[in-house]
Amino acid sequence: MTTTPPSPLSPHLQIYKPQLTSLMSITHRATGIFLSLGTLVLVYWLMSIAAGPSVYQHAQQLLHTWPSLLLLFAWSFSLFYHLCNGIRHLFWDAGYGFTLKATYRSGYLVIAATLLLTTTAWITAFVINGVL
Amino acid sequence: MRLRSHLAKIRGLGSARAGTEEFISQRLTAIALIPLLLWFVTALISLAGADYDTAVEWIRRPVVTTFLILLILVLFHHAHSGLREVLEDYIHHEIIKTIAMVSMKFLIITITVGSVLAILRIALGN
């Protein structure tokens, strides 16, 4: 019988001080899971167009209710975050930006870019729709 | 002489040596998704609230049909990579993990095929 030696454990989250780096890492995963659910809305939208005008009309009405808009807002924020932080990850994978200073700087840059892209997207959408 | 089979020796002791390919494909899909998603989100914003004919006309443009299908394929491939990682990390029961991973894979493939079919129906429909 072989016994597997106990593997080293990750830091216990309950006693681990939250930091920008760890929080952003957790958020990356959380937004990824949330976005996977969001793909279902994309699929629903495509299928409603394929099903014809009346179904599409119904889908459009459903997507323009307040709860839907709130969800769409959350999905757009998650998308931009996951996209920007994903690019940050790609730089790490290529071997760049590993110093503590660079990690924090890129972290703040990702947050700023996410906020900027999300607001720009929604303001543009509202302007095009004549709401603003 | 040792009579233990190699399988018994390595079972439960880590890597199946298939990680590199998965690592690379997750990065490649990520890179492909950067332009695809930026294009798609921009298009969606300009299509927000569009009527049926406008949406159909847009999807029927050959370039749009092509990139929309590419987006669906790459997006679901990437989603599968990520969700598999999550299941691998958080489900520790071997049988439940296997069932969850297989179900997830089947579900994602079904949704992918359904989405591509929807795009083709719009693009090729009368």
Image (tube, coloured by chain):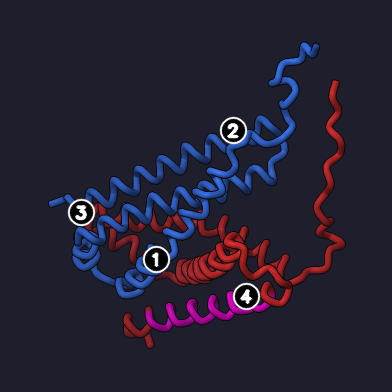
Residue drawn at the location 64% of the way across and 36% of the way down? B97
Letter of the red chain? A
Residue A106, numbered label: 4
Residue B123, numbered label: 3
Of badges 1 and 2, the one in the foreground is 1
Residue A18 visible from this viewpoint: yes
Disc 1 is placed on an element classified as: helix
Question: Pointer 4 indicates a residue of which chain?
Answer: A
Alpha-carbon neighbours of circle 1 within 10 Å: few (<14), some, or many (≥20)? few
Question: Pointer 1 indicates a residue of which chain?
Answer: B
Q: Which residue is mark 1?
A: B35
On the image, the x and y values in percent for residue B70 come to 34, 53
Chain B is which colour?
blue
Q: Which residue is mark 2?
A: B99
| Amino acid tagged 1 | Pro
Q: Are marks 4 and 1 on the same chain?
A: no
Disc 2 is placed on an element classified as: helix
Vertical comparison of A17 with B125: above or below:
below
Question: Pointer 2 indicates a residue of which chain?
Answer: B
Of badges 4 and 2, the one in the foreground is 4
Vertical comparison of B60 with B4: above or below:
below
Pointers 4 and 2 in contact (CB under 8 A)? no
Q: Is residue A106 magenta?
A: yes
Vertical comparison of A62 with A101: above or below:
above
**Between discs 3 and 2, the one toward the N terminus:** 2
For the record, the magenta segment spans A104-124
- Give the Cα separation between the discs numbered 1 and 2: 34 Å
Alpha-carbon neighbours of circle 2 within 10 Å: few (<14), some, or many (≥20)? few
| Amino acid tagged 2 | Ile
- For this view, does A74 lie left or right of residue A42? right
